[in-house]
Structure formats: C-alpha cells, structure tokens
Image: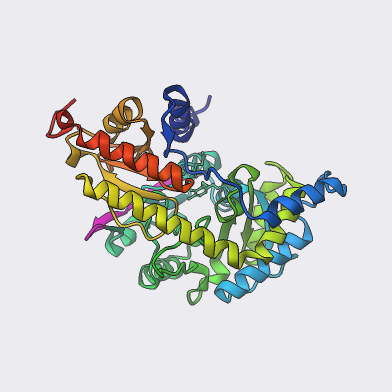
Amino acid sequence: MREPLAALGTSVFAEMTALAQRTGAINLGQGFPDTDGPEVLLRVAAEAMRSGHNQYPPLNGVAPLREAIAEQRLADYGTGYDPDAEVVVTAGATEGVTAAICALAGPGDEVLYFDPGYDSYPPAIALAGATPRTVPLRPVDGRFTFDPADLAAAIGPRTRVIVVNTPHNPTGTVFTRAELDHIAWACLRHGLVAITDEVYEHLTYDGVAHVPLASRPGMSERTLVVSSAGKAFNATGWKVGWVCGPEHLVRAVRTVKQYLTFASGTPFQHAVAAALRERDDWLATLTARLTTARDLMVDALTGSGWRCYACEGTYFLQADAVELGYPDGTELCLDLAYRGGVVAIPSAALHADPRDGAELVRIAFCKAPEVVETAAQRLVSFTTVPRLRGKGAR
Ligand code: PMP
Ligand code: GLN
C-alpha cells in the first residue's frame, strides 16, 4: 500500500467496538445511538421502498431532500442555497468531507484542521495527496479552545483549506462567534476555503447555539458546509449527508463524488427530507434527552473523583485518566473494558501526535436512559475500588 496510507491501520472506532463485543462491555466508545429516530423517518423510508424509490438517485441527490436542506439552512441560520446548484447529497458527512478535501487540495497544498479532530480528516488529506497541518485545541478553564496565535502560525503560503468542526468531536466545544471570527479573518486574509463539519449542528446544550462559519461576514462564498442526518435523526447507519456552498465549489465536490460513490440511499434520502421538514419536536426531545444523559454521566463521574471537561454539544464528553492514577487514557480504557464493563475511547487516537491528549478518554452518552444509568453506576464502582486509587495503581 502506498505511503502515507499504509500507516493508517484500523480506525479506533472499529477497534473499540470489537473490544466491547469481545468483553460484553457497554459500548460508550463509538458514537451511535441505541434507539431509533423519529417515526416519520422510519415510515417514509418504508413507504419510499414500497413505492419504487429503489434505483439510483440523481448524482446530486433527490430533489425533495435538496429542497429540505436548503430550507433548513435558511430557516435555522439565514444562509440561502440554491437546491439545484448549491447542494449535493453525499454518502454521509464522511464522503462529503473527503470529496471536498480532494476537490480543493492536492500535492503541495496544505490542509489545516483543529487537533484533536475526527479520524477521517488525516486519511482524506492523505488521499488528496495534500499535507496536513494542525492547530491545537487546549483546555482553558476546563473548555477546549484555540489560541489565535497558533492559528496564524499554522498558515503558510501553501495553505489552501481549513477544516472546521463545530460542535466539535471529541472535545464537545461549540465555537463561539468570536472564535469563528478569528477563523473567518484568517480565511479572508490568506484566501483559504473552509470546509465546515457540522454533523452535530442540532446537538447543543444549555442554550448554547450552533453558529455556522458560513453565516459570518464574507464567509458564505468561501465555505463548503458539510452535515449529515446520522446524528440529528439517530440514523448513523443510513449514511445520508450533504454539502452546501457556492456553485463553483459544489460543482468541484460533485465531480469528485461521482467517482467515489456516484449516489446512494434513494429511499433514505426521501425519508430524511421528510424528517428535516418535521424536525422541531423531535430535535427538542432529542437534545433534552442528551442533556439529561450528559448530566447524569458528569454527576456520576465527578462525584467519584473523575475530572470532566466542558461539554457544550455532541455525543461526547472527555475526562482525565491520569488524575485517576492511570499512566494514560489507553491503560484506563483497557482496564475499564475488562474490569469495569464499559468501553470508552482513548482520545490520543484522535490526535495527530498521540502524546497529545494521552491523558484523556472520550465517553459517548448518546444511549438510552437505562443504559446511561447502568454505565454510570459501573463507572462509579470501577473508580471507587480502593486499589485503583493513586498513581501507578496498575
Ligand atoms: N464528522 C464528525 C465530527 C463525526 O463525529 C462523524 C461521525 N458521525 C462524521 C463526521 C461522520 O458522519 P457520517 O456518519 O454522516 O459519515
Ligand atoms: N462519529 C463516530 C464517533 O466519533 C464514529 C464513526 C465511525 O465509526 N467511523 O464515534
């Protein structure tokens, strides 16, 4: 296999899900819900299959979905897109991000992303033949953010693209307007195109609002927005995502996408269109449930000596393994799976250099209330076993 792809190995999500299956532990590693999405989603998918929507959809995606996406972006954020020319449906956000990176960057170009970051970004940059550059996210008063000086320092003459994920996996940070304006300013000053990964756009808590970078002044014409139905509608296995942006950039994404998958998931596209149109009640219930799950988990963890970082959005919260006496997050995750009956992810796997974030673990709380409760109890008893206290316990 050609370098640098040979170095990629197996994704941490596949590994940790296999560990959960092997040990019978509760899987709070890979981020996927264990309950179904809204009734309308399931009903319309079944109806679409029964009424013959089973062949290739158009390369762009079916018209009702593109229209529903454009309406949602306008209603939620005030950003307008032409559903025919400025929206393309993809096989999940993963394909959207990969096609966008491949469309915009090639050998000799640099692509920036915030570190830690979602695990598909470095391979997508490698597939494009481009070079990754990172901007560190570090905790300030328990919330992960970046230093604008680090952002400025990471940009060079060959930087073409910046990938911006907010709400952010794995830190749970939702970028503020001020943070986004630092990014926007860098894009405008250096002529960068932004690819925004907004798959958790609807999953924010405590009144924190998701603000798309494309809604900041000067940014809509240089931003490709990527999002997905997986997280919004508890349908991660459907892999229905999309990309919106100015016509010339979306055309470039479409050109790449047609030779990756061409198109996918016709009946699911129809169902997501219907769910997007009727999203309000479902999303209110979903975010209320996720807030309760997060609070239960944070209370249980902090009550038994864990240190948790702020979680403003997403499915995830991060906690510190070293404070519990473990050398790093990987050691904690292994012990936790075998003895504690819970699988989490060592956050190091989502860092460009695994030494960064070595002390952190990521815990997904997107599960049914009884599962979250059982997992929280297990985490408490695991932590309060006396021999695990103190450094070098293992
Ligand atoms: N980006 C981020 C930040 C994610 O957490 C995920 C995982 N859902 C994806 C992209 C992939 O989304 P999809 O399943 O729609 O491809
Ligand atoms: N987005 C999910 C997570 O961060 C996993 C997606 C995957 O398994 N590739 O846990």
* Residue 214 makes an appearance in the image: yes
State the residue in front, 101 or 327: 327
Q: Position of residue 303 (x, y in %)?
A: 22, 49
Measured as percent of width and height from the top left, residue 392 is found at 14, 29
Location of residue 6 with respect to 175 vertically, above or below:
above
Along the viewing direction, whichever of 113 and 152 lies nearer the viewer: 113
Residue at the left extreme?
A: 390
The image quadrant of residue 346 is top left
Q: Nearer the viewer, residue 259 or 264?
A: 264
| Residue 349 picture quarter | top left
The span picked out in magenta is: 131-142
Q: Is residue 9 visible?
A: no
The way the protein has been coloured in the rendering is rainbow
Q: Residue at x 64, y 55 (%)?
A: 38
Q: Could you tell me which quadrant the C terminus lies in?
A: top left
Left or right: 195 with respect to 136? right
Q: Which residue appears at 54% of the width and 66% of the height?
A: 222
Which residue occupies 77% across, 47% down? 46
Residue located 77% across and 62% down the image: 64
Residue sitting at the far right: 52
Does 24 appear above or below 363?
Answer: above
Of the pair 92 and 311, the residue shown nearer to us: 311
Residue 221 forms part of the magenta stretch: no
> Magenta includes 135?
yes
Majority SS type along the magenta span: strand
